[in-house]
Structure formats: C-alpha cells, structure tokens
Image (cartoon, rainbow, N blue to C red):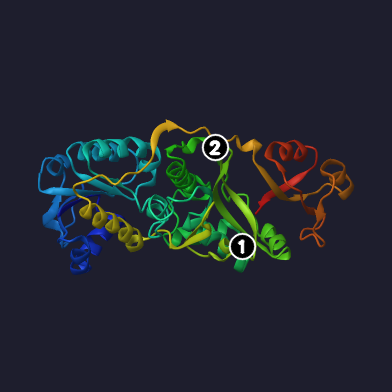
Amino acid sequence: MKVAIMGYGTIGSGVAEVLEVNQELLAERAGESLEVKYILDLRDFPGDKNEDKLVKDYKVIAEDPEVGIVVEAMGGVHPAYEFVKEMLLAGKQVTTSNKNLVAEKGAELIAIAREKGINFMFGASVGGGIPNIRPLNTCLTADEIEEITGILNGTTNYMLTRMADEGVSFEEVLKDAQAKGYAEADPTADVEGFDPCRKIAILTSLVCGQQVDYQDIYTEGITKITTEDFAYASQMDRSIKLLASSKAVDDSYSCMVAPFMLPKSHPLCNVNDVFNGVFVHGNMLGDTMFYGSGAGKLPTASAVVADIVDMTKHAARNVFIEWKPEKKQLIDYKESKNSFFVRTTSSKEEVAAVFGDVAFVKDPVVPGENAFTTNVMTEADFADKAEKIAVVNRIRLA
C-alpha cells in the first residue's frame, strides 16, 4: 500500500518514522507492505532521509492512482478540509489527528467516504495515542454510553499538576510549560479550554450519531485557578482538574469543559503531568477508563498508523461510523446540575441567608475569607445566588 503524508511537521514526521521503524511488523499486521510515496510540504528539508519524497502540489497525490491512503497532518481547518475532501473524492482513504478538522467537518467527510466505499478515520484526534475513538465504534457499540468525562489536554494537566504538587502560580507554571514545549507561544487554545472542547464534541458526536457543534459547549479554562484554590482543595482531600464531560440527559446531552475539584479517590484524580485519561460509563458495561499519553510525536503517530493498518485491511469496504450531519441540540448548560466550592469575603450569616444549608471549610486559607461547598443545584440557580454575595472564586465539585 502506497501512503502519502500531507504535512511534515511533528505528527507527519512521526508517522514516517513509525512506518519505517516498524515496517516489518506493520506489513504482517496489515497483510501487505506500507510505503510512503509522497510527503506534501511547502518547506524544504535538505538532508532529510525523505527529501526525495517531498512534493509541493497536493494534486500530485490526488492524481496518482498508486496512492491508496493519505495522512492529513497539516493542522487547522483550511486548507486541510479542501485537500482531504479532494483526496476522498479521488477514492483515497484518509486518516487524520486533526481535532479542529474532525470537530467541524467530520460528518461531511465521513459521508463522502461512505459514498465512495472507502474510509475517513481519526483515531488520533482525541487523546493522541490513547485508544478511545476506536472502542467507541467497536468494543462499546453494545452499550448506551451514559457519560464520558476526561482529562483531554496534556498541557493544562501538566500545569495543574505542578500547581498542586509544588504550589507554583499559574503565571509561573505557564512560562515553564512554554519553555518545555508543552504550551504554544499563544496558549489560548489550551488554557481557555478550547482544545478539550473540540475533543468532547467529537466524542459526543460519535456517541449520539449526530453533529455536536463545539460552539454550543460551555467552556471555561484554568486561568482563574490559584495556589489558594489548591490549598483549599488539599484541605478537603481533593485536587483540581480540567474536565471535559458529556452526560446523557433524557434524549439529549449535557456537555461542559471546566475545572472541577475531584476527591482523591476519583480515578481521574491520579492522571497527572501530560497524561490524559478518559472515563466512560455504559448502561451495560458500567465504568471503564482509558489512560495514556495524550499528545506527543510518536504516541500520536502510533494512533495514526493504527488507522493506516485498519484501512489497509478494509481497503475494499467502508467501516461504518454513525455520525449524521444533522445537529444535536444540547441541554442548556444553565439547566445542568452541580455542587460548588465557593470562596467569599461575605460573612457566614450572609452566605447562609442566600444559600441555606452549606458546609463551611473549617480553616480558611486566606484571612478574611470564608469557604464553603453547596448542595447540588442548577447552574442558573447558583449564578443567581452568587450575585448576592462577594464571590472570590468558585469551582465545581465532582
């Protein structure tokens, strides 16, 4: 099978490396050899071992009948979408790790692939090297998935881990993450939660079989989390994690990305540093969890190559993925229910007058503050009550 790679950055070069290093093993598992014929990139790579395979025009790939599988490793939505669509229309199978492309155009590209009798796969788009996309389409198809909750961003998990373990401030740990290459120069997609938002949209789309727009998901990042919040969490035998969650509610879903305080007994509480974890609850299976490297060159490339092997085995038929383009209407996040940890400069009497029966933290970390946890209530009810006291910060409880 001849393979083309579009984009020779971190992921694209990783795919080429995995295909080379594991070529004999992959040939046995795929049933035939896998060979990179083209690498599309506008840049030059003098001296690179794959220099002779570089092309600058994507039509070279689209018009070559020998190429059966194309890897999209360019990133972003445009021109990746246009290139991928043309490859599918030309009868070439495509795999990608591009969450932005899949979240926005996944339903359409899946439909094109089905019409052509080929495959569009995206096993590396959520969780990098963690196998969670494929189990949702195969192993867990007998279950009604009632909840998916995960730590889906390695950058913010690394930052929150350091804040918890070392008492480092958000500003300091962000600089450290950027210096280590975990965070971009513009870290907005990570620290504001936009990255895991797209990932939970993809997972929810797969579970419900319809398009879930990431723009409809309430998203909150970690920029307001402080060392004082972690001190309170420690006192309560909890820690703070950025969770992306999707829960079935009647005939719809309640989705959210936000920091949560988790008890130390929660399985996701022990997912630290740059690792990801995805917790899934099915109505028959019960609880299961996927854990591993959620990003990085080789873990992500490994998942992409797994798609290549799968598509090679199914070169003559489409592997059905239920994801219709019709939009799924999500539950308004204001109707979702949570309990909350609250820091306030208001008195206990003022808090009780507004929230009623609450549990106060015995020893406030900050002089002049009171801290408490609420009973379960709707987001709308909490927002209404919170306006009546002086809130320093609030974090949802899991």
Residue 12 visible (yes or no)? yes
The answer to which of marks 1 and 2 sits earlier in the sequence is 2
Query: Mark 2: which amino acid?
Result: Ser
Rendering coords of residue 326 (x, y %): 42, 30
Rendering coords of residue 280 (x, y %): 51, 55
Farthest-out residue, top: 326
Label 2 crowd bin: few (<14), some (14–19), many (20+), radius 10 Å = few
Taking the spot 38% from the left edge, 41% from the top edge, the residue there is 322
Rendering coords of residue 40 (x, y %): 19, 48
Q: Secondary structure at mark 1?
A: loop
Rendering coords of residue 3 (x, y %): 17, 53
Label 1 crowd bin: few (<14), some (14–19), many (20+), radius 10 Å = few
Q: Is residue 329 above or below residue 195?
A: above
Q: Is residue 190 above or below residue 168?
A: above
Q: Is residue 94 above or below residue 33?
A: above
Q: Secondary structure at mark 2?
A: strand
Q: In the rendered view of the protein, which quadrant contains the C terminus?
A: bottom right
* Residue identifier under label 1: 266
Image quadrant where residue 57 sits: top left
Label 1 and label 2: CA atoms lie apart by 26 Å
Farthest-out residue, right: 349
Taking the spot 77% from the left edge, 38% from the top edge, the residue there is 385
Task: Say the numbered circle drawn on residue 252.
Answer: 2
Q: Nearer the viewer, residue 364 or 103?
A: 103
Query: Mark 1: which amino acid?
Result: His
Q: Nearer the viewer, residue 132 or 363?
A: 132
